[in-house]
Image (cartoon, helix red, strand yellow):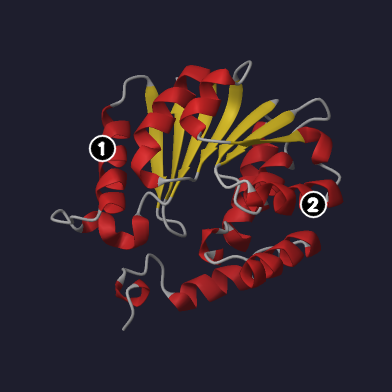
Amino acid sequence: MNEEESYIKIVSADIERYAEMHSSPEPELLSKLNRETHLRTHMPQMLSGTAQGTFLRMISRMLKPERILEIGTFTGYSALCLAEGLPESGMLHTIELNPEMQDFAGRYFAEAGLGHKITIHIGHAAEVIPCLPGSFDLVFIDADKENYILYFELCMKKLNPGGFILADNTLWYGKILDTHSADKETMAIQAFNDFVMRFPGVENLMLPFRDGLTLIRKR
């Protein structure tokens, strides 16, 4: 048994397959991006994937945000999904630490006809976020887990009242149940989850979906 197999399966494989069969299929361009991500990157599991991508797309279309902030671009899959809900005048700012991802994601943004709505920032999110102009209606956090609390605090300052933050991987393969874990990423997610519960002025819902997705609304 490898390390990943030892993690708790949030939803059974049979239920996941059934849900997939009763959900809209992955759009052709995203399917192409999915395949290339698996072929060309060392950690393709970082991709949001079909189910979560559809969820992000629907959330964005429901909220119709004018401005979106994403922390963690990777190959651009989640950014493309989130950008679907932007009006013509809307803009998505996405931050990526790895400069090699800029051209990769940028190609797909252009192919989707969304290049004019998506701006990629290369650098450390903690340094980029304070420099971004204006405020945001929707934020998606999916980056290094040890800085989740920092990113959350920085984003709350930029989030409009009534705006939403989506934080990914908040169940962390089920390892958050291990209260004696010495793993830094597990401890960081545990601390983040507790921090959000204590944070004033928000309403939050943790969804046992994929690897855990927490929806947080600023009052």
Quarter of the image where the C terminus is located: top left
**Label 2 sits on residue:** 107
Q: Secondary structure at mark 2?
A: helix
- Residue 163 is left or right of residue 35, and the answer is left
Mark 1 nearby-residue class (10 Å; few <14, some 14–19, many ≥20): few
**In the rendered view, would you say 103 is above or below 83?**
below
**Residue nearest the viewer, comparing 116 with 103:** 103
Residue at x 36%, y 69% (from the top left corner): 9
The mark found on residue 194 in the picture is 1
| Residue 95 placement (x, y as % from top left) | 59, 37
Real-space Cα separation, disc 1 to disc 2, in angstroms:
38 Å
From this viewpoint, which residue is outermost toward the front?
A: 99
| Residue 33 placement (x, y as % from top left) | 72, 62
Mark 2 nearby-residue class (10 Å; few <14, some 14–19, many ≥20): some
The kind of residue on which mark 2 rests is Arg
Q: Earlier in the sequence, mark 1 or mark 2?
A: 2
The mark found on residue 161 in the picture is none
Residue at x 57%, y 59% (from the top left corner): 47
| Residue 202 placement (x, y as % from top left) | 39, 25
Q: Secondary structure at mark 1?
A: helix
The kind of residue on which mark 1 rests is Asp
